[in-house]
Image (cartoon, helix red, strand yellow):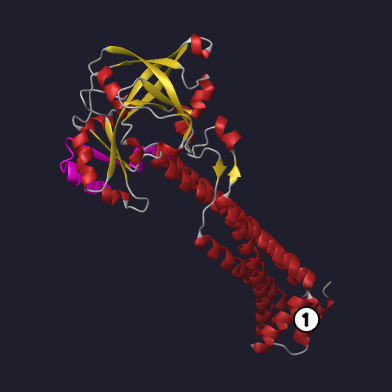
Amino acid sequence: MRFIISLALKNLTRYKRRTIITAVAIAVGLMMYIVVDSILLGAEFESMRNLRWYETASARIMHPDYWEERLMRPLDISIDDPNTIVDALRKEGIAAAPRTMFSADLILYSDDFGEDGNMPVQVTAVDPELDNTVFRFEDTLIEGRFVESGTNELVIGSWFAEDIGAKVGYWVTLVTRGNGGFYEAMDMQIVGIVNCPNPNVNRTLLMVPIDTIGDYLAMEGSATEINIALPENAEIAEEVARIQQLIDPSGNDLLVVSWDDLARDYVALAEAKRGGTGMILFLVFIIAAVGISNTMLMAIYERIRELGMMRALGMNDRSIQLAFMVEAGGIGLIGSTIGVLLGIAINFYMVNVGIDFGLLMRDMDMGYRIQSSFRGTWSPSTIITAFFFGSILSMLVAWIPTRRALKMDIPSCLRHQ
């Protein structure tokens, strides 16, 4: 065995050009696999995080009937005393904040916007003091300030503001139906513009004080939902069940829903994308395998005469086959090591900096909750898989042509061109 290993190592140094070419092919294929997997996993991870931080929270409490009618944003199906529930949750160490969601017509005036107009919008009424304990908007202001309780103020998403030409200080009117069916018009002044990592929020956000909206729409202190923030590493399903038992074990009056149920559209899209991601990784895998196979097959078939000479000198077939496989494994080990190191180096940049697709994401909704930069993430399992894949595949690819060549008689091997 020592002789076989020694022979394989000598062949690696003797055929330097072939060793380098084959190792580079392996390295490039494995590097691509690691980087592509990192980008796709990173996009999914960051989308889920931005959903929880800026859109759905970790979980949400609402009336069971509201859950069935949630797309219609009904105000008459609400939580009667949300502050009592919020206080109870806070005593358990759970951050919570009430919100009221409603549909409205946004009316723009020519004095500020250059021309009159209107459009349908979704409005979020928040508690200015509690909302930032659940969501992460405190660091997203790019102009102005947040709304204050008891005021006719409005905060708007940055992309929405760009689309309609809104600026801090402009006035708009929200027209909607109150709790009871009456129409109400509310004059609001834009006091802040936010730009968060979630593109859907930047496109649609209109945030107003919940107490002001409660007075206008006759909510009488109620809210349509209570949003909950849980630790990043929390078992969401277990926490949702615990909160349900805490506030309403029967589930008849209040329902606790996890973020993935709230974002079913994204979860369904993510599952579909995961299938596409698997196909992309499979294609990268095939490209790497074909590159490795091609160079290894060329290397073996170029040395059939050498193989015949070794047999003529008395070396048995099993030892010859083992020597070629060890040599191929050595090339695979070199290529895998280089590929993994290159993949880690590029992935380090991807994790910390990423690739900026801001212009593309601004005008096109790809489904991901990512505003601009696609960042990677670390996946030790992918790196380990890539490393062993390069070495093992090289040995398997070497075994097939070597076995075929050994079926040739010695004169045929020596005459091979």
Tell me residue 253's x, y (percent): 17, 35
Residue placed at 66% from the left, 74% from the top?
Answer: 330
Residue placed at 37% from the left, 24% from the top?
Answer: 123
Instruction: Check if residue 346 falls in the magenta segment.
Output: no
- Answer above or below: position of 98 versus 235: above
* Residue 212 shown left or right of residue 19 in the figure: left
Instruction: Specify the segment rendered in magenta.
Output: 240-266
Tell me residue 323's x, y (percent): 68, 81
Q: Which residue is tagged 1? A: 308
- Answer above or below: position of 289 versus 257: below
Quadrant of the rendering where the C terminus is positioned:
bottom right
Comparing 199 with 69, the one in front is: 199
Residue placed at 41% from the left, 19% from the top?
Answer: 189
Comparing 243 with 352, the one in front is: 352
Comparing 144 with 180, the one in front is: 144
* Residue 217 shown left or right of residue 113 in the figure: left
Query: Which amino acid lies under the numbered mark 1 shown in the image of this protein?
Result: Gly
Residue placed at 18% from the left, 45% from the top?
Answer: 246
